[in-house]
Image (cartoon, rainbow, N blue to C red):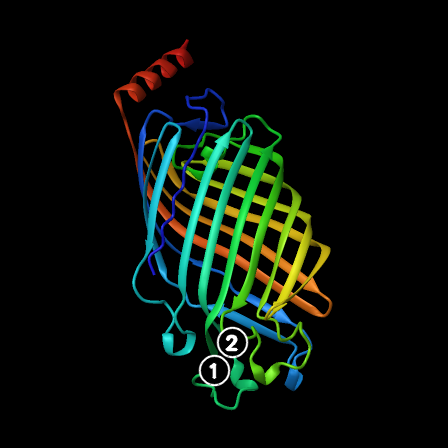
């Protein structure tokens, strides 16, 4: 399935004389990326046949993107290559869609993401399903879906910590940069099955929770964390790590019946990006992990949305960028 990914970056433009980063706001940045996205999840409960935990895996497709950045505006268009990485005979077929928006404003970085997956398998279901074998071990659930809509704002306490330098396209570090930050997060996420319960009939009982066809949550919270970036001999890296919590309205549905609950849940913020960057070009590896969880009575639902990308691009001079950088170099030599 083709996916469309749109990413816009809004920031106050201009070169900066800070020792910790350098921005290329007046250059035209052209780049491409290749990677993959995944969103496995697990369900834990007191299921039939003595089963306590079910692991759901999606098949994975290679995703390719092309984009550019100039001053305050950035655009990326991406699509999945045909076929799945894992054999469809064991892992089925997964359709994936992703849409995102990113922008900077002063000491904040904001992003809005929508992700959707259709088609999962239950790993190693042959241990309780007599129709499966060790050579075809997984229960293919083509109508099982997962989706996530997230809106996040990172507020950096250090004024000289720039997300453009972290992302490495329209800027890079020129030295060490670090800061404490707060991330506010608003999320809607969940899993569903269009043709029945999320759990196979062999493991269900008469309870509404175990027979649920949808499980999800809406949550709002704050995650404090620490971010660190540096560039040494043109090798650049940045990492984020945060731990916090959310207030959560969680629910499950069985047919026409919906039961909802209020609670709290932990949240982890993890991301890493690093590679080689010079003023004319860059090659980076980027990862991020969006870890979500829901607990309702004896039910535990945990899911991780993550992606890994290899990004490469060039930064092209314009007349304005050459003039601005010559002026900056002249000021620095005075």
Mark 2: give few (<14), some (14-19) or many (20+) Cα within 10 Å.
Answer: some
Question: Quadrant location of the C terminus?
Answer: top left
**In terms of secondary structure, where does tag 1 sit?**
loop
Residue under the point 41% across and 60% down:
96
Label drawn at residue 137: 1
User: To which quarter of the image does residue 22 belong?
Assistant: top left
Q: Position of residue 150 (x, y in %)?
A: 54, 48
**In terms of secondary structure, where does tag 2 sit?**
loop
First-in-chain label (2 vs 1): 2
Q: Position of residue 229 (x, y in %)?
A: 52, 37
Q: Position of residue 236 (x, y in %)?
A: 45, 39
Give the farthest residue toward the bottom.
130
Give the farthest residue toward the left.
319
Q: Position of residue 255 (x, y in %)?
A: 59, 71
Q: Nearer the viewer, residue 36 or 79?
A: 79
Asked if 305 appears above or below 197 in the picture, the reply is above
Q: Nearer the viewer, residue 180 or 260?
A: 260
Question: Quadrant location of the N terminus?
Answer: bottom left
Spatial distance from mark 2 to mark 1, Cα to Cα? Answer: 7 Å
Relative side of 173 to 251, left or right: left
Numbered label tally: 2
* Contact flag, marks 2 and 1 (Cβ < 8 Å): yes
Q: Which residue is mark 2?
A: 123
Residue under the point 35% across and 67% down:
84
Label drawn at residue 177: none
């Amino acid at each position: 399935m083709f996916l469309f990914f749109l990413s816009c970056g809004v920031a106050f433009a201009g070169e900066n004389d800070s020792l910790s980063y350098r921005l290329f706001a007046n250059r035209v940045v052209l780049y491409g990326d290749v990677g993959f996205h995944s969103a496995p999840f697990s369900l834990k409960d007191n299921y039939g046949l003595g089963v306590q935990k079910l692991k759901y895996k999606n098949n994975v497709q290679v995703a390719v993107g092309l984009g550019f950045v100039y001053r305050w505006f950035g655009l990326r268009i991406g699509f999945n290559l045909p076929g799945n990485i894992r054999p469809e005979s064991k892992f089925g077929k997964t359709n994936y869609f992703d849409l995102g928006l990113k922008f900077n404003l002063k000491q904040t970085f904001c992003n809005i993401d929508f992700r959707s997956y259709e088609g999962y398998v239950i790993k190693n279901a042959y241990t309780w399903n007599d129709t499966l074998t060790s050579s075809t071990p997984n229960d293919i659930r083509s109508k099982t879906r997962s989706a996530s809509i997230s809106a996040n704002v990172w507020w950096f306490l250090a004024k000289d910590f720039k997300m453009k330098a972290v992302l490495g396209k329209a800027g890079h570090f020129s030295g060490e940069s670090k800061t404490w930050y707060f991330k506010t997060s608003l999320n809607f996420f969940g899993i569903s099955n269009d043709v029945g319960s999320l759990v196979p009939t062999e493991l269900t009982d008469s309870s509404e929770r175990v027979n649920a066809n949808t499980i999800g949550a809406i949550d709002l919270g704050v995650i404090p964390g620490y971010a660190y970036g540096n560039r040494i001999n043109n090798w650049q890296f940045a990492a984020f790590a945060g731990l916090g919590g959310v207030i959560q309205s969680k629910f499950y549905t069985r047919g026409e019946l919906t039961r909802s609950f209020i609670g709290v849940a932990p949240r982890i913020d993890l991301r890493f990006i690093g590679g080689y960057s010079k003023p004319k070009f860059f090659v980076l590896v980027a990862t991020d992990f969006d870890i979500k969880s829901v607990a309702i009575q004896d039910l535990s639902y945990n899911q991780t949305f993550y992606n890994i990308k290899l990004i490469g691009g060039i930064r092209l001079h314009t007349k304005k960028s050459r003039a601005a950088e010559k002026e900056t170099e002249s000021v620095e030599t005075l």
